[in-house]
Image (cartoon, grey):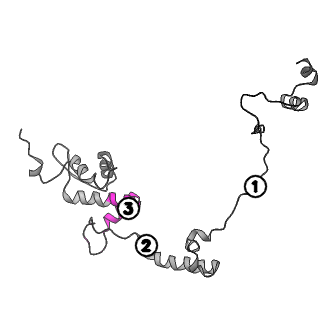
Amino acid sequence: MATHPVNERSYLSIGEVLGLLLEDFPDVSISKIRFLESQGLIVPERTAAGYRKFYDEDVERLRFILGEQKDHFLPLRIIKDRLDTPPAGSIRPNKNERPQPRGLKNVGNAQEVVEQDTSEVFGDASNHDVAKHPAARVAKVTPPQTARKSARPALPDPSDAVGRPATYTRAELLQLSDLQEEVLAEL
């Protein structure tokens, strides 16, 4: 049985695809590629023996899927929708041309609203960089201070030397030890 070198085949094995993707996506694994296949995001051809055959289009599709997950944190359902309905004028997603996430076209408007609200709250905010941050609009709330009795005994006085016996008055000794006066007298 003759085996052909990789260079003569027109397709790649799953291990070879993994080798190509690892540089850009170090967390990818063979099981991840199989999972993406089980979810219907990629559909590689199969050999007669059942091995997966990946072509350049499949590798680019994988790059797109992994890039969307890594760069935009998109769920697979959304990525699948984007793959099934590519943007008008393009046939397939390209490595260099990723669609802009849907919410980005309104970023300019949101920034204007934040600046307007900030100027209403802080007056002329041009002198205050902190005031421009959206978090500056959040009301500052501090939790109420509660007086809690400490269950621990008081710390020793710093003037007490280590290794030297502590000295207590009779009243202190009775209070700290919970001894009765009669028992203390016997000691």
Where does residue 52 sit, x and y in percent of width and height? 21, 48
**CB contact under 8 Å: marks 3 and 1:** no
Q: Nearer the viewer, residue 148 or 173?
A: 173
Look at the numbered discs 3 and 2 and tell me whether their residues touch, using CB distance below 8 Å.
no
Q: How many marks?
A: 3
Per the rendered image, the range of residues in magenta is 65-92
- At label 3, counting other C-alpha atoms closer than 10 Å, the crowd grade (few under 14, some 14-19, many 20 or more) is few
Q: CA distance from mark 3 to mark 1?
A: 43 Å
Quadrant of image for the N terminus = top left
Q: Which structural element holds mark 3?
A: helix
Nearer to the camera, 174 or 89: 174
Percent position of residue 30, x then y: 29, 46
Q: Determine whether the residue tagged by mark 1 lies in a helix, strand or loop.
A: loop
The residue depicted at 32 percent of the width and 59 percent of the height is: 65
For badge 3, the amino acid type reads Asp
Q: Which residue extends farthest top? A: 186
**Which residue was labeled with disc 1?**
145
User: Disc 2 or disc 1, which is closer to the eye?
Assistant: 1
Residue 94 lies in what quarter of the image? bottom left
Magenta span: helix, strand or loop, mainly? helix
Quick one: 37 or 170, which is closer to the camera? Answer: 170
Can you say whether 108 is above or below 40 in the image?
below
Query: Which residue position holds label 2?
Result: 104
Q: Is residue 126 left or right of residue 78?
A: right
How far apart in space, not on screen, are marks 3 and 2 (Cα)? 14 Å
Q: Which picture quadrant has residue 159?
A: top right
For badge 1, the amino acid type reads: Gln
Residue that label 3 marks: 71
Indicate the amino acid at tag 2: Leu
Circle on res. 34: none
